[in-house]
Image: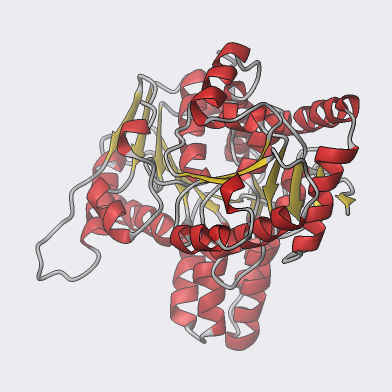
Amino acid sequence: MTPTTSQRWTRLVIVVRADPVICGHSGEARNLAEAALDRGFSEVRIVTWPIERLQAAGLPLKPLDTVLPYRDGIVVERPEPVGDYKVPDGRHLAGITGRLVELFTDGVPTVCLSLYLSPHTTAVTDAVRVAASTGLPVDVVTMAEAVGSDVTNVVRSCVEEGRFGAAAHVLSGYLSSDVCLAVSEYTRDLVVSCAEEIDGRHGTFFAAQCRDRVKISYPAIDTSAYLDLDDEVLDQVLTRRGLDRDGYVLFLSRLSKAKGVDDLVAGFARSHVPPSTRLVVAGSGPEAAALRELAAASGVGDRIDFLDDVDDAEKPYLMAGSAAYVLPSKPLPEFVETFGIALVEKMLAGGGPVITTDTGGIREAVGGHAIIVPVEAPDAIAAALDRVLVELSPAERRTWEDDARRYALQFDRGQVFDRMFAHLDGPASGGADVPAGARPALVRV
């Protein structure tokens, strides 16, 4: 165990939409929980939502039987809702808040990290206030991490709709945390920009506080899960899926409009890659049915495979076996790619180059180790695929792979955890904590 400033506390509580939700921050919570055990925390709890509530919300979910078990020492709690049908909303949030009050008042020195300001940081803020009012011993510090949809789906929409109170509610709760974090510099800048607009309209002073206090904490990734993959297992995975090494282009993420799978299908159809090359679209989400129809009408539908049952154990091998990984993300009002966790995972696993867009925080995730195409540009995707699968030599592909992996190692969960917890003993204000080399130039086509 490496001693860190975190030894002042013995328990870590993470409030998040955890497994089985298909979300990079669900995986981040697992990684931070395991890093906490490695750093000497004696107790780690993930407080999240009941399975049936996640299912009813329509979130993209992994099949329950494919979710990997959590490491011993990590307790996942799914508090039951409070009240009955006469309480039309907020019942589950009340259950989470109530459980947090119990954890905050038992005298155990606790760090509580919330991923997603709405509603998780809101629940933590309320629980801290209630805990303090009980007169019971309270020893808790709070960290709140803003992710993309906090800003695009909540704060920015409130600004655009003139809903001052709702925006102020989220920002006030965020700033009441002891440590305020954002998953990328892009996210931090977006938070400040929205706060400036609120201040300009209403005479508040959120922006200065956000600019001074919000630090960057890139998502924590278990790099060991993507390194030194077993060749025999890789062959078994590909054989089971009917795939060949370097014989397919991979997309693996949520199937939503913002991910640009429609542009990928069109680009794949227009490319001059070998006829034996397949396109594998792995994931689930609201656009699944529409994308299957689009693929069937593309003229290359017999070369496109949809996989909706890829689990966490299989994912690194599918990435490692691919000839290229394509994420043509595009900014939409409801979602902007504020980092790109899957891109980093792919760079760690190897395989072929990453093809993506310069959207949101993607630049911070890939550095100069991706082929960048414009947003909504199938012809550019086709050209990038031709470059990777037709023009690059094996030696060039190996160099690309090695350079990308070295860059991606900075996002290892242990390093991210240590940087995050250093803020607890560091100055209360200052600039963003960005690892060196996080913003080099991009390779474009």
Q: In the rendered image, which quarter is residue 266 located in? A: bottom right
x and y percentages locating residue 221 in the rendered image: 59, 33
> In this view of the protein, which residue sits in the foreground, 355 or 140?
355
**What is the image's colouring?**
secondary structure
- From the viewer's perspective, is 373 left or right of 142? right
Total labels: the figure holds 0
Residue at 57% over, 48% down: 302
> In this view of the protein, which residue sits in the foreground, 349 or 25?
349
155 in relation to 11, above or below: below
Q: Can residue 43 be seen from the camera position used here?
A: yes
Residue at 34% over, 40% down: 63
x and y percentages locating residue 324 in the rendered image: 72, 39
x and y percentages locating residue 42 in the rendered image: 39, 21
404 in relation to 144, above or below: above
- From the viewer's perspective, is 444 left or right of 45? right
> In this view of the protein, which residue sits in the foreground, 169 or 269?
269
Residue at 69% over, 33% down: 247
Quarter of the image that includes the C terminus: bottom right
- From the viewer's perspective, is 134 left or right of 347? left
Residue at 55% over, 63% down: 294
- From the viewer's perspective, is 277 left or right of 23? right
Quarter of the image that includes the N terminus: top right
Q: In the rendered image, which quarter is residue 14 located in? A: top left
Q: Can residue 431 be seen from the camera position used here?
A: no
x and y percentages locating residue 396 in the rendered image: 90, 29
